[in-house]
Each structure stands twice: as structure tokens, then as C-alpha cells.
Amino acid sequence: MKTQAYKVRVGLGTCGIAAGASKTYDEIVPLLAAHGIVPEKTGCMGMCYCEPLVEVIDSEGKSYVYGNVTADKAATIVEEHIKGGRPVAELLVLCEDTETEHAPYIEKQHRILLKHLGKINPESIDSYLEVGGYEAVTKALGSMTPEEVIAEIGAAGLRGRGGAGFPTHLKWKFTREAEGDQKYVVCNADEGDPGAFMDRSLLESNPHSVLEGMIIAGYAIGATEGYVYCRAEYPLAIRNLRKAIADATERGFLGKNILGSGFDFSVQIREGAGAFVCGEETALLMSVEGKRGMPRFRPPFPAQKGLFGRPTCINNVETLANIPHIIREGAASYSSLGTENSKGTKVFALAGKIKRGGLVEIPMGLTINEIVFDIGGGISTGKKFKAVQTGGPSGGCIPADMGDTPVDYDSLKAIGAIMGSGGMLIMDEETCMVDVARFFLTFTCDESCGKCTFCRTGTKKMLEILERIAEGKGTESDIDLLEELAEQVKAGSLCGLGQTAPNPVLTTIKYFRDEYLAHVRDKRCPAKKCKALIRYEIHADACVACGLCRRNCPVNAISGAKKTPHVIDQDVCIRCGLCLNSCKFDAIEVTTGEPEPQVAN
């Protein structure tokens, strides 16, 4: 039987590799070789929750996406689908005319930036050219003036996707109008929010789209040099970006006299050491210059005096990746999506207690509930949806009863949250909001550069109060003091790190004040997460004395003989939860408050 002509793609983004995609690729290569097929390497499709992913495309162009394809399952796909012509239904996650439980993940998205992720080879410039790559550069340099390019971006309504949402065309306009014999374009790829991976995935999976955006930005503002500032923790992104720069230079899209237009533009990479504060644009510029990454006073703004004291335009990865689409397809195509003041699409990284964690791209204005339940598939634990944190450490916690809130700049700002760069952490009813606020404030405290007093000292004092509350030692006046300090830190901090650090605290107090009161009044953690306010107890009537919990306890806090119900020594127990996780008989319970008195027999 002659094998039908197939194309096979294997996702080899960081998420896929972490799930075992490299082993899957190594396994499938010799199996496909027997059928004359060489599998293509691609990046992340966004479906991180079911990696490794393998896509099979038949001779008619029909796509079959298989999920959770470990190395042993690769042979099944080759044997049944490639050789036998029968799709493997139990592994199928997406197919054009087949209903699967994963289909809603795609149906409500509108993919512009993610359209080609998982479809093209990020290491091949030809793969990018096949899907319209560098057509926007050709159009901009060949038939548009810099002013017309800026006007087109303005008509599209694109706002910065790095967090603040400043109109992109205004930043370009200010930089173009600034006086200077040398100007720069800087791509901010210093993605530091916990749980965020939008920029990493774009750079890993489609680096040329970001380069193309930088070239157009350089042409528009009159810059001849560009820098990509990327954290060193993204080795695959940096590797793919380096190759993309080399290939684009070889093909004449970077370098001298690009496409015969007389315009010169080159790009360099600067690797950051992972300091969160370097996501702030002036601190980023200091780091690029080889100095310690600390923010400076503004004005002057980078558009007037930025990198090496010259006019500089700083945009993040997602902002720049949108530029080729807008120039190629026209502003009207982009501005037809979204809301009145929030045009286009936004990429989010869904993480936390969500069934379909990964990258999603939605038109602005979709509600939180639509993202969590329709696209994300709901809560992975089966518990009730409690809250969503948008914007990472700079964002706010939005309660489930506000799930009808549209996701756009104005709507999120109105309820005390921000869009941020696109991290979206989903929480269920077992999440303690005091603990969430403490987690994010711990992060911003650690990442503060220490330059200004309000951020350096104010966030530390706020954290001390939160820790007191979490330990059951707080008072109601502590909650009031937290709010007062938070407002002062917001008003007095020099840069965005300090100005937004109080947001998780303020929003959790505003929307979950009852949890704070339970901690200070009742000395109780309703979510049973704060270690100082919980106990692990073994129910004697359910314990079968198997000894598994005793053997897993790292501090020997559990005792008990064979056939005798075990007991936890509360003075020794460190509340690690390993006993609860190891018990197969539901004999261990987490309780809050004081233990019930034991009645002697």
C-alpha cells in the first residue's frame, strides 16, 4: 500500500520540550523516514496544556492536531494514520470537521500574532516568507513615507501591549520629531511577570515578525539601529532570534540600503540578568548601556533622551509583532476588532487553576468569563472559580462575581486592575487572597532596585503587615494601615514597579475584605492555606495505619504502630501537606482555628 503524501509538524517550543517533545521528535524521525517524510520543527501553538503536540496534514491540506504525544504514542500515529490512513481519535485535539472537547479553545480566539505559531519553522526565513513575511517592510519602504506609516499605526488604534497601553503612534511621532543625529528602536523582551510567557513564545516561534516590526519602527522614527533586550533565562528565544537576525541580514531585510530603499537598519541583542525592574523602560536603557538597571526621573522621556542620551522608541515584543499585520492588511482590518478605546487583539498567558492553560489571543472586549470558561475550559480542580489576577505583580485580583467585565484597558482600570503585559492567573475557592497578596508583594519587594524610599521601605512595611495578618497576629487597624501605606507607595514611587506594587493588596482588600477580617478577628484562614492558622489532623476512624503518611513526613511528626491509628504531633508538624497528598484513604483533614477538645474514654 502506497503511503499518502503527508506533512508532519512537531512543536518544539519551551513548553513542548519541557513536556518531552524532544524525545517525541527523536522517536518519530526514523519512523517517518520509512515513509519518506521529514518532520518539520515548529514553535508553540499555544496549547501548552496538552503538549507535546504533533500535527499531521494530508495531501488535501486537512489538519489533524494530536496532543499529549509522548514518544511511545508517536509510533501509534505513524502506524495508524500515516501508514493506515486512519486518524487516531483518542489522541486528536483539533480537526477541522471533527468535534472535540478542545475545539472551544480555538473558536472564540481571533489569531493575528498566534496565527502562524506552530505552523512555521522559526529557524527558517523561507517559512516566514511563505506566509507573507517581510511584505510589510517591502510596502512601507517602497510606497509609504515615515509619516504615512505612523498615521497608519494611529488609525489602527494600536496601544502598547507592555502594560500601560500608551498609543503606539504617539510614541513613534514624539521620537521622530525629537532632535538627534542618531535614534534607536528598543524591543523590550524583559518579560518578568510570574506566569507570563507571551513574549517568550513569540520570539521562540516567530522571531521574524518582531524583527519586521522593528525595521518598520526604525524607518518611521528615523532610527538606524535597534536593540532587543531579552532576559538570559530565554535561551531558545535568544537562539532563534540570533538566527533570524543573521538570515534577515543575509537576505537584505537588515543592514545597509534595505531593499534598495536607501534605509539602513541593524539589530543587536542584549541579554538581561532577569531583574524585574528592567521591564521599566528607563531602567532597561541603563542595563543596555551596561549600567545597573535603575529607573531615572522623567522628563526627559526616552523619546527625547533615551539610549546613550539619544532619542529612543521602546516597544514590547507583542506591540512590535502587530506592526507587520497592520501595514500589510491596513489599519481598518485591525481597528475593526476590539472596543472603542482598545482596538485589535491581546495575547494572554492562562495559568493557575485552569484546564486549558497556555497562550490565547482574543479580540479586546471579550469578558473574563468567556476567557476562563469558554476558551480556558473552566477550573481544573473542579472547585468554584474565585478570582483572576491580571497584570502580574502590577495587576489586581478580580472576583468571580465580576466575571462579566470586558477585558480592555478602560474596563480593567475602572475596577482597580490593569491589562499588564498579559499574564492571567486563575484561582479557585481554595486560594487564600491574603496569601496571594503576600506572594506578589514578596516578589516586588525582592525585585525593587531600592532607589526610592517609598518603594524600598514602603513595600517592605506592607509585607511585614501582611505576614503578621497571615500568621494570625494582625488587627483590624492593620488592614486600614495597609490601605494607607499602599496609596502612599503608589503616589510616591519613582517608577512603575513601586507605583503598581500595591495593586494586588488594594484589590484583595477591596473585594475580599471578609478574608482579611477572618484572619485578624477569628485567627482563621478560610481557604486553609496560611500555615500558622491551619492544622493537619488524622481521623482515627478512617485511618488504616498503612504508614504511608508517616514515611512521607520530612520531620517525623507522625507516629503510630501497626494496626493503630496514627497521630500528628502539632508541635513538630511544619504544615507541608505531604501527608495529605500521600494518604489514599481520605483520613487526613486540614482544619482551621483551635482544635476541638479531646474527650477521654
Image: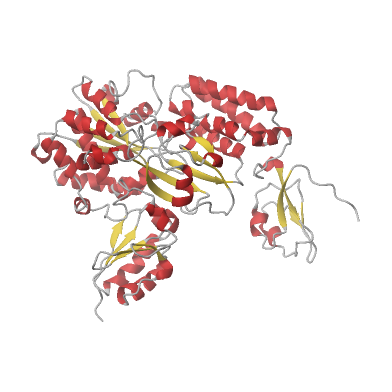
Classify the position of the C terminus by image quarter: bottom right
Classify the position of the N terminus by image quarter: bottom left
* Position of 126 relative to 158 (above/below): below
Q: Position of residue 125 (x, y in %)?
A: 21, 51
515 with respect to 378 (left or right): right
Q: Where is residue 388 in the image (x, y as percent from the top left)?
A: 51, 41
Q: Where is residue 592 in the image (x, y as percent from the top left)?
A: 72, 44
Farthest residue, direction top: 299
Residues 570 and 465: in front is 465
* Position of 499 relative to 343 (above/below): above
Q: Where is residue 29 in the image (x, y as percent from the top left)?
A: 31, 68
Q: Where, by quadrant of the figure, is residue 173 drawn?
A: top left
* Position of 187 relative to 209 (above/below): above
Q: Where, by quadrant of the figure, is residue 523 drawn?
A: top right
Scheme by which the image is coloured: secondary structure
Residues 66 and 296: in front is 66
* Position of 102 relative to 505 (above/below): below
Farthest residue, direction left: 260
456 with respect to 220 (left or right): right
Give the mark count: 0
Report whether residue 234 is seen: no
Farthest residue, direction right: 601
The residue at 17%/40% (across/down) is: 137
225 with respect to 279 (left or right): left
Report whether residue 191 is seen: yes
The residue at 21%/19% (across/down) is: 179
Q: Where, by quadrant of the figure, is residue 333 drawn?
A: top left
The residue at 46%/34% (across/down) is: 412
